[in-house]
């Protein structure tokens, strides 16, 4: 084959490939879509995923179901799963650091995923047992510094969003506490209520009722202003720790091999769903704010968090008492 015919053939092949991808995006989705949540039922990620699934199902006129596959196995099932967009994942910013926590992953949490969009964010709330001797953030920090390793802190799992918040808090306050990881926020909160654990972070969508009923005591919330649902709980800045700034976000990912036109299509449809006043209200009821983004912006955020919090988790897992 001469050079001219080779170039024409290559051009036609490339055009056909592009047209094929476009055609796939135009017909997407033509089958049931699963949103995988790598956390247990009742977690805030799970609650938000179900709200989003309902809106996408209406938009796509296709069944969209949420499946809880807690832990690394759930994340891996997406990385190694279908590449036609029939399986996507809604997760939290803890995803960016799981490679630091677990060195034996069979996937790369950044390279093996296609960022679709940020979905929302929520303040993190520092909680302690209702009968804890410390009633303010300053008293908690003082108690932790007075007797290193005398207090314990829990999370929804090492590398979870609340886990990152706990490590950031420990790092900024230069305190030493015993780490007690749990398999989800409900379990972590029960540990706090029983007094088995001294400190933890939670979200209003999961722990709000328990805080309002007095079964958990909230000492501070992240964010620039107090939460409307918890007007008596000060921000970290008001409580004396202004340097503690942390954004717990939730976002949607797909396997890296999912065609870009499909990723873009999901991102556009998701942005439309997230603009629905009813969905905004549902998120607000959980103490969360809606915030969509482009795939490119979300990927940049993922990489930035992996760099920033990855180093923090690496230092913390080396220095924390297990």
Image (cartoon, grey):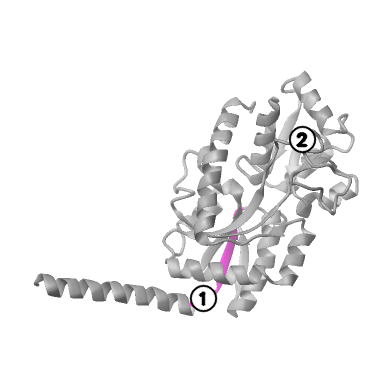
Is residue 65 toward the left or the right of residue 206 in the image? left
Q: Position of residue 41 (x, y in %)?
A: 69, 56
Is residue 318 toward the left or the right of residue 105 in the image? right
Residue furthest top as drawn: 146
The residue at 55%/43% (across/down) is 97
Q: Position of residue 55 (x, y in %)?
A: 66, 72
Kindly identify which numbered label has been placed on residue 81: none
User: Would you say residue 180 sits in the magenta stretch?
Assistant: no
Name the residue that disc number 2 marks. 199
Residue 62 shows up from this direction? no
The residue at 90%/45% (across/down) is 214
User: Would you say residue 35 sits in the magenta stretch?
Assistant: yes
Q: Position of residue 217 (x, y in %)?
A: 86, 41
Is residue 84 toward the left or the right of residue 201 in the image? left
User: Closer to the camera, 26 or 131?
Assistant: 26
Name the residue that disc number 1 marks. 29
Residue segment shown in magenta: 28-38
Mark 2 residue element:
strand
The quadrant of the picture occupied by the N terminus is bottom left
Vertical relation: 82 (above or below) 250: below
């Amino acid at each position: 084959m001469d050079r001219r015919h080779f170039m024409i053939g290559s051009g036609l092949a490339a055009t056909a490939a592009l047209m094929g991808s476009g055609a796939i995006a135009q017909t997407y989705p033509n089958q049931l879509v699963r949103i995988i949540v790598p956390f247990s039922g009742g977690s805030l990620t799970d609650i938000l995923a179900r709200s989003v699934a309902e809106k996408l199902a209406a938009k796509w006129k296709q069944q969209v179901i949420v499946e809880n596959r807690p832990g690394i196995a759930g994340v891996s099932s997406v990385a190694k799963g279908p590449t036609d967009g029939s399986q996507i994942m809604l997760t939290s910013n803890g995803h960016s650091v799981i490679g630091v926590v677990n060195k034996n992953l069979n996937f790369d949490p950044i390279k093996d995923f296609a960022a679709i969009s940020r979905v929302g964010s929520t303040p993190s709330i520092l909680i302690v047992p209702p009968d804890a001797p410390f009633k303010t953030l300053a008293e908690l920090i003082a108690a932790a510094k007075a007797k290193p390793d005398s207090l314990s802190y829990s999370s929804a799992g090492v590398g979870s969003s609340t886990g990152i918040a706990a490590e950031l808090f420990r790092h900024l306050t230069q305190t030493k506490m015993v780490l007690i990881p749990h398999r989800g926020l409900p379990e972590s909160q029960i540990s706090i209520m029983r007094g088995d654990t001294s400190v933890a972070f939670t979200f209003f969508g999961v722990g709000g009722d328990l805080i309002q009923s007095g079964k958990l005591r909230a000492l501070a919330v992240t964010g620039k202003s107090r939460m409307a649902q918890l007007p008596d709980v000060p921000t970290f800045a008001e409580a004396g720790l202004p340097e503690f700034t942390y954004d717990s976000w939730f976002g949607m990912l797909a396997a890296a091999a999912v065609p870009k036109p499909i990723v873009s299509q999901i991102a556009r449809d998701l942005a439309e769903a997230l603009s629905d006043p009813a969905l905004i209200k549902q998120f607000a009821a959980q103490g969360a704010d809606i915030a969509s983004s482009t795939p490119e912006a979300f990927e940049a955020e993922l990489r930035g968090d992996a760099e920033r919090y990855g180093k923090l988790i690496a230092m913390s897992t080396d220095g924390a008492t297990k």
